[in-house]
Amino acid sequence: MLVSGHTNIIGIGSYMPDQIVKSEHLMAEIDSDEKFGISESFISDVVGIEERRVAAREQKPSDLAIFASRAALKHSGIDASEIDLIIFCGIERDWIEPATAHRVQQFIDAKNASCFDLSNACHGFMNGISVADAMIATGSASTALICTGEKPSNIMYEALRRLAKSNSKSDVKRWLGALTVGDAGGAVIIRRSQHQSGFQKFNFSSNGEHASLCYYEYDVDGRVEGQMLMKSISIEIVDFHRCMIRDTYRKLAWKPEDVDWLYCHQVGARPHRQMAELAKVDTQKAPITYRKFGNITSATIPVNFHFNPPQKGDKILILGTGSGLSISQTGMVF
């Protein structure tokens, strides 16, 4: 699905919790070397994730989104009353109902905003941007806040409990990916673009055939069930992106050498390198967040923008990814 863009980013914010958890400490906790024959340095040395941030147990997903949204507001220079749309895009939310976006609205005092949640695994943030862009294009909104607050550490702790009690190599295959995640908040504010700047094209695609590679759910007793087969899903995602990239460049009328920045979803070193290679973009133009923050799920793209801010006129290629599978390839001129 190819969609033309109509907006530009006017504010960027992120929030990283203070607590740092080292990958080697997690592997030591499950006694990975002795029980599974996997070095305690595996996640650090092979996956490339040295550490991640973990939010306080009492923090809600909205708390992380609120901090990031306040930072985006400060960066934009606008007042919260100017926001007329808030979309929260996290995997987990504060409640089943109402939408978590309402709590974000309350605590940033965006009293004029309509609110709803949109979720699509790690890809939710890019879906949120495209929906907000379309609403602004039709005049349904003028200024939109797209935000997320992710606490995949909840699943990380569950994986730790299970693997600490298990000696099964099939269990470690299913759950090891859950030890690569980290908590974060991210937010952007968008408005209708001026001249030739802003989002140019969104190229979306999904393939439900691979939905079972990475999922979690709650059984009838409220226990978490699922798996994160990160090697398998990474292979499928890279292939999926590779099949689309030529069409995306053609629709953008770009060549790889035109790209100033490549921001992509990040689950580890090898997939990140492969994403740069398939886009034919030098890895120096593809900044890394996974090493110190891990897989921060739907917060990856806004956090990358925040820590590696583009300059006016820069051409940016965004490769979004989520389990399901869902991917997008987006071109924008900042």
Image (spheres, rainbow, N blue to C red):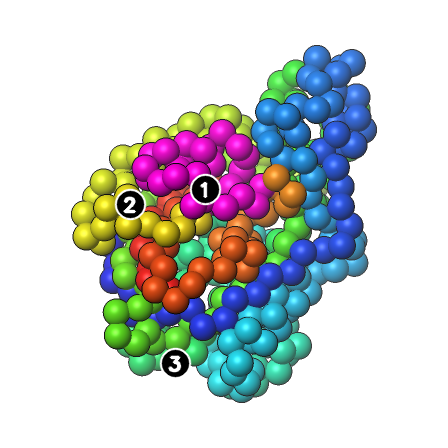
Q: Nearer the viewer, residue 19 or 62?
A: 19
Packing grade of label 2 (10 A; few <14, some 14-19, many >=20) is few
Q: Would you say 188 lies left or right of 225 here?
A: left
Q: Nearer the viewer, residue 101 or 182?
A: 182
Q: Would you say 148 lies left or right of 223 here?
A: left
Q: Amino acid at mark 3?
A: Ser
| Residue 142 disc label | 3
Quadrant of the image containing the C terminus: bottom left
Q: At x 51% / y 76%, what residue is drawn?
A: 76
Comes first in the chain, label 1 or label 2: 2
Residue 219 visible in image = no
Q: At x 27% / y 40%, what residue is drawn?
A: 244
Residue 35, given in percent of the width and then of the height, sits at 76, 15
Packing grade of label 3 (10 A; few <14, some 14-19, many >=20) is some
Find disc 2 in the rendering and name its residue.
257
Find disc 1 in the rendering and name its residue.
284
Packing grade of label 1 (10 A; few <14, some 14-19, many >=20) is few
Regarding mark 1 in the picture, which secondary structure is present there? helix
Regarding mark 2 in the picture, which secondary structure is present there? helix
Q: Nearer the viewer, residue 90 or 52?
A: 52
Q: Amino acid at mark 1?
A: Gln
Residue 212, given in percent of the width and then of the height, sits at 48, 33
Q: Amino acid at mark 2?
A: Glu
How far is mark 1 from mark 2, CA to CA? 13 Å
Comes first in the chain, label 1 or label 3: 3
Circle 1 or circle 3, nearest the eye: 1
Q: At x 40% / y 51%, what residue is drawn?
A: 261
Magenta extent? 264-290
